[in-house]
Image (spheres, grey):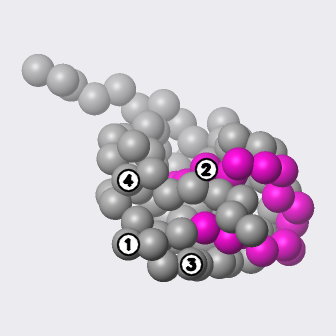
Amino acid sequence: MINALVIHEKDNVFVSIEHIEKNSNINYKSLDGKSMSLIAKTDIPIYHKIALRDVKKDDFLIKYGEHIGVASTDILMGEHVHEHNIESKRECLR
């Protein structure tokens, strides 16, 4: 059963659609419709972000195809992504 959603092709995070326990399967469909899964490295609350791939410290986190912040630490694929490992980064929009 699908328990997470990928939103945009550029995203390096995706979103849980139910609570996901550490060490359980995260099941989702890629944007081309392929069924995929990976193991949750941490508990992930409903509607929270999950690292879709490994993210290095200071790399941008991307959701909806847009930068939403930078990683404040290395984040492993399958880890919960939230305020404990994201820093805000305002960009010049001029």
- SS at mark 2 in the image: strand
Residue type at mark 2: give it.
Answer: Val
Does residue 30 show up?
yes
Q: How packed is label 4: few (under 14 Cα within 10 Å), some, or many (20 or more)?
A: some
Outermost residue, top side: 94
Query: Label 3 sits on what residue type?
Result: Ser
Tell me the SS state at disc 3: strand
Q: Tag count in the figure?
A: 4
Q: Which residue is mark 2?
A: 15
Q: Quarter-wise, where is residue 42 in the image?
A: bottom right
Please name which of the two marks, 2 or 1, marks the residue nearer to the observer: 1
Amino acid carrying label 4: it is: His
Element carrying mark 4: loop
**Left or right, residue 40 beside residue 15:** right
Tell me which amino acid carries mark 1.
Asp
Residue 14: quadrant of the picture:
bottom right
Query: Sequence-wise, which precedes: disc 2 or disc 1?
Result: 2
Mark linked to residue 8: 4
Q: Which residues are magenta?
A: 13-28
- Of labels 4 and 3, the one closer to you: 3
Q: CA distance from mark 1 to mark 3?
A: 9 Å
Where does the image place residue 32, in percent across and percent down from the top left? 38, 72
